[in-house]
Image (cartoon, rainbow, N blue to C red):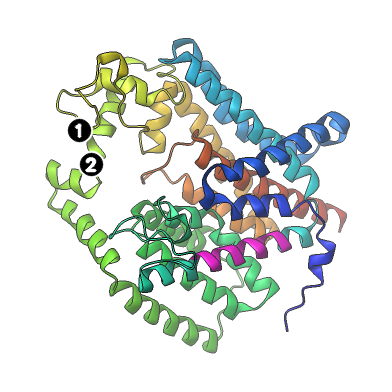
Amino acid sequence: MVSFKFLKSAGWAPWLPLLAVISLPFGRSVELFVLIMAVIGLYDLIKNHQNIRQSFGLKAFTIVFICFMAPALLSLPDAFDLRYSSTSLIGMIRFYFCGVFIINRITNYNTHLWLATGIGCVLAFWGVDAWLQQLAGHDVFGLPPFSSGRISGIFSDNAELGLMIIPFLGVAIAAFKERINVYASVILALLSVSVILISGDRSGWVSLFAIAVFWILLFRPKNFKFSRNNFLISISGIVLMAVAVFNTPQFQARLDRSLIGLSGNYESVNTASSFRLPIWNTALRMFADNPVNGVGVRGFRYAYPDYALSDDIFVDKSLPKDEQVGAYQAHQIVLEFLAEMGIIGLIGFMAAMWVLFVKWYPIVRSQQSALASGYLISLMAIFFPINSHLSSFSSSWAQVIWLLVALCVSAMAIEKRDCSDS
């Protein structure tokens, strides 16, 4: 029987990141909880700056934050729209103090386990809600899907359901296995995977594949064993999920569109990629003209018309030149850093990946921590370069990234401290 006594001992701190995750489908509401965490984090840093600054967690978090922020700051002198780029960077500061809050306030394993279990319950609700929308045409709140080809569940007019599950999937499965049992974790995994597939978000599909590969190659415990009963139950669940998913018109339509690209010509690949090729080519031209520090963070849309071809579908030529904008982002993380921050940005991104794969991975691997592994594997998946991405500096996706980085660091710091004390 599942015990919920740990709820009473978890304290109030984990409620804020959990509420942030819960509010992700509701637009700007997540900003409230991020702001509260940031204010408390700033207070903690001022009041206990000596202890916090010397902690492993804050040092690790700060290094990754600098890998993103230093190139962004260096892009400002040549920013295409200095005001907008500056405003975006000032807004990023709240994520740093939010991270300080998480690292300083969520400091024991049971609290982390409570939070991860709560996140798992959120994902389970999103999954059931999405399948209800698929079967009934609306979700539990009466919300319709994003389009006839995209199931969006509680996200409704936002088509990011599948992608928003990815950052929290690994840790949620690990928490369900530890807090409830292996069957609960298998059910959550199958439910979440099926929703990612029927959501039609192909970047979510690629991220899901990356999670599977990283787990098999890097994170699978050396003594990992799967009993015969668990194996049979899992296979049965996979078969049922596959039958259900393959019979949804949304999945079939997105799969058919993806397969068009196999013919290899420009038009078919462009169609299969949802017309990303003009955007990526424009990003490369942007980088070629601004190779050192790019056009400035979040300046992509404003610089776009100057580098787009005359027949580019993302530029409205009917508008006056000074009112024209283009695609909002590069839709590819490496091209985003190159176009907006130049070579300096690419160096920063590679440094961040070096920290994740070379510095953090051995620590997490040696600790055999299920929760830290769950967070880190999701980080690796969302930064996987062979994919289409949201902008790393957009408020909606940046909140997810830095929440995930802070939770990963916090879980690592707890395991590191416990190993040192034992």
Front in this rendered view, residue 27 or 99: 27
Could you tell whether 47 is left or right of 281 in the image? Answer: right
Label 1 packing within 10 angstroms: few (<14), some (14-19), many (20+): some
Identified by mark 2, the residue type is: Phe
Kindly identify the residue that appears in the image at 41 percent across and 19 percent down.
294
Residue 30 is drawn in which quadrant?
top right
Numbered circle sitting on residue 313: 1
Helix, strand or loop for disc 2: loop
Q: Quadrant of the C terminus?
A: bottom right
Could you tell whether 291 is left or right of 393 in the image? Answer: left
Helix, strand or loop for disc 1: loop
Is residue 370 among what the camera can see?
no
Front in this rendered view, residue 52 or 128: 128
Q: Are marks 2 and 1 in contact (CB under 8 Å)?
A: yes
Residue 33 is drawn in which quadrant?
top right
Could you tell whether 204 is left or right of 215 in the image? Answer: left
Numbered circle sitting on residue 227: none
Kindly identify the residue that appears in the image at 51 percent across and 52 percent down.
25
Residue 306 is drawn in which quadrant?
top left
Could you tell whether 172 is left or right of 324 in the image? Answer: right
Task: Read off the residue under disc 2.
Answer: 275
Magenta residues, as a range?
A: 114-126
Please determine whether, in this image, residue 16 is positioned above or below residue 85: below
Q: Is residue 137 magenta?
A: no
Q: CA distance from mark 2 to mark 1?
A: 9 Å
Please determine whether, in this image, residue 61 is positioned above or below residue 71: below
Q: Earlier in the sequence, mark 2 or mark 1?
A: 2
**Can you give x and y, in whole percent of width and height, for residue 87 in the image?**
55, 21
**Can you give x and y, in whole percent of width and height, for residue 295 in the image?**
40, 18
Q: Quadrant of the N terminus?
A: bottom right
Kindly identify the residue that appears in the image at 14 percent across and 27 percent down.
311
